[in-house]
Image (cartoon, rainbow, N blue to C red):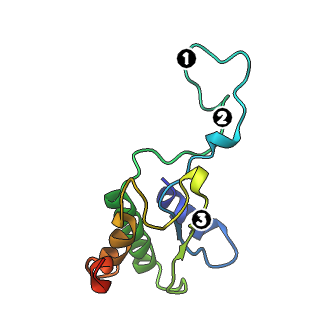
Amino acid sequence: MAFKVWDEGYETHQVPYVPAVGAGWDSTPRYIAPANRPATPDRTKWPGCTIFVNESPAAFKAFVQASFAYLNRHPDVPRFVTIACFNEWSEGHYLLPDNRFGYGMLNALGEAVGLQKLNQRRGK
């Protein structure tokens, strides 16, 4: 996961390394499968891209909480986290209610920052 390289980024970058979190990512729909796919799956050959596996509201909440832990370990880093969710529905890179998790990802974000069931505040 990305949080495993945050401390490395902190040590090697000349500017403060601010964590970025996202609810999911799988850009394989954008890749054309090669004519001769290997018999054994090998992601280094195809598609060769980053894929979040087992994404879920609980995993996203843990990811957000890991970003807070990183900031707590590095008080000299500005106290904010970027949320990288760009409405990329075909890649699973979005932070909106959907048919798979409902409001789960939004609620997970709310719970990570200490709020409960944000969608229920508006009666939905």
Q: Which residue is mark 2?
A: 47
Disc 1 versus disc 2: distance between alpha carbons? 13 Å
Name the secondary structure under disc 3. loop
Residue at 53% of width from left, 63% of height from top?
94
Give the total of numbered labels.
3
Q: Earlier in the sequence, mark 3 or mark 2?
A: 2
Q: Which mark is residue 71?
A: none
Query: Residue 10: x and y, percent?
Result: 57, 70
Quadrant assignment for the C terminus: bottom left
Residue at 50% of width from left, 55% of height from top?
24
Residue at 66% of width from left, 34% of height from top?
47
Query: Residue 123: x and y, percent?
Result: 28, 82
Left or right: 32, with 77 as reference point = right
Q: Which residue is mark 1?
A: 40
Q: Is residue 34 above or below residue 11?
A: above
Query: Residue 85: x and y, percent?
Result: 56, 67
Query: Residue 122: x and y, percent?
Result: 32, 85
Q: Residues within 10 Å of mark 1 (few under 14, many from 20)?
A: few
Q: Is residue 38 above or below residue 62?
A: above
Q: Residues within 10 Å of mark 3 (few under 14, many from 20)?
A: few
Figure quadrant of residue 44: top right
Q: Is residue 107 above or below residue 8?
A: below
Front tag of 3 and 1: 3
Q: Which residue is mark 3?
A: 87
